Image (cartoon, helix red, strand yellow):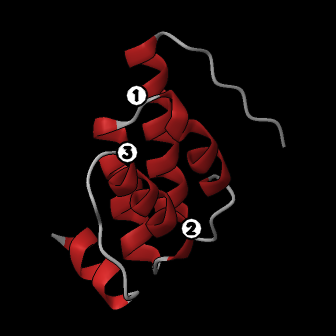
Amino acid sequence: SWLVSWAAAQGEGVGVGDAARKMLWRALREGDASVRLAAAQVLAQIGRPDDVEPLLAALTDPDRTVVDAAMEALAEISRRYDVRIEYRV
């Protein structure tokens, strides 16, 4: 998968469970635009409340497609877990 390839390029493994989730967070912060976008899209599918902080940070990404994907992921988490997520500029 793209995450395994990206992690290997960083000299890391992906792991499972929380380790894989933390690698997604790292990809969202440190990857190129396509990696950051993919990480946000995956978090839209599997995201849970502890993913909110990394996704909020992605709202300042210089790439608008990443920002849009992070917003969608936050909306999905909000719907899935019935939580209110606020972001202030």
Residue that appears at 27% across and 69% down: 3
Where residue 87 is drawn, which disc sits there? none
Q: Work out whether mark 1 precedes mark 2 in sequence or the reverse, and give the earlier one.
A: 2
Tell me if label 2 and label 3 are in contact, CB under 8 Å: no
Q: CA distance from mark 2 to mark 3?
A: 13 Å
* Residue highlighted by disc 3: 43
Q: Residue furthest right?
A: 89
Where residue 29 is drawn, which disc sits there? 2
Residue 25 position, x and y percent, is 49, 57
**Element under label 3?**
helix
**Element under label 1?**
helix
Above or below residue 28? Residue 74 is: above
Neighbours of disc 2 within 10 Å: few (<14), some (14-19), many (20+): some
Residue that appears at 56% across and 67% down: 29
Q: Amino acid at mark 1?
A: Glu
Residue 9 position, x and y percent, is 33, 90
* Residue highlighted by disc 1: 76
Q: Work out whether mark 2 precedes mark 3 in sequence or the reverse, and give the earlier one.
A: 2
Q: CA distance from mark 3 to mark 1?
A: 9 Å
Tell me if label 3 and label 1 are in contact, CB under 8 Å: no
Of labels 3 and 1, the one closer to you: 3
Q: Amino acid at mark 2?
A: Arg
Q: CA distance from mark 1 to mark 2?
A: 20 Å
